[in-house]
Amino acid sequence: MKKFFTILLISLLAFSSFADGYTIRDKAEVNSFDQIFMKKYDKTQDDASTVLEITAAVFPLVCFMAPGEDHLEIGITYAETMAVAFGLRCLFKGTVERTRPYMYFEGAPQKDIDKGDAYKSFMSGHSIMTFAAAGFTTYTFLRYCPGSKWTAPVIAATWALALGTATLRITSGSHFMTDVLSGAAVGTAVGFLIPLMNSLWFAPSLKNSPIEVLGNGVAIKFQW
């Protein structure tokens, strides 16, 4: 009889751990800051974050409101920006292993576990791409469309898309707060630095840039 109850107890524990095809991780493994924002998996919000990511990636097309002779430069610069952002996304995903928040709850997506994506939480790739797009759009619109009445709405919209995507990556249980914050920082840096480097390369059109290199530093000009 004692042996029977021992086997029954082990079976119940095994069922609770593997009911969703995986072992639920111990939240004590996670730092106290990230624990505050941890959520279980939500497919609707996960899918919505991908829709916003795609929208954010397409949004920089508004920069083609600039004069026609600048379109080739804008297109090349945006392609470079997204290529660098995607390269960094793959680099971090491929070298840093971190279990996603949803693995600490019931209901994690089994398909992501099977293909190993459940262990690629750092950094948030969605955040890297959307914040890179936002940084690029802000810099490029200020440079090529100075004084435009669309400046404020365009800048507000591009950052809203990035922030919305980042928020959904957390609330869907797909990422920790630190994944999103680091991804946003990297993406923003890429979004501004690649266009800035290209503006220095395409020197003849530098006169329209919102960022001016001075003898004793760098000045940023904002026109509304």
Image (tube, grey):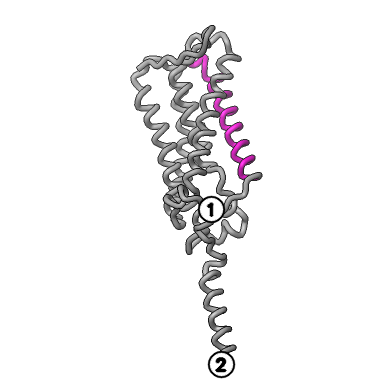
What's the magenta region?
68-94
Can you say whether 13 is above or below 162 in the image?
Answer: below
Q: Quadrant of the N terminus?
A: bottom right
Residue 150 is a magenta residue: no
Disc 2 target residue: 1
Visible residue check, residue 86: yes
* Distance from Cα at disc 2 to Cα at disc 1: 41 Å
* Residue beneath the point at 57% across and 65% down: 22
* Residue beneath the point at 57% across and 28% down: 81
Can you say whether 195 is above or below 207 in the image?
Answer: below
Identify the mark nearer the N-term, 2 or 1: 2
Relative image position of residue 180 (x, y in whole percent) = 49, 42
Secondary structure, magenta segment, majority class: helix
Amino acid type, label 2: Met
Depth check: 83 or 8 in front?
A: 8
Disc 1 target residue: 100
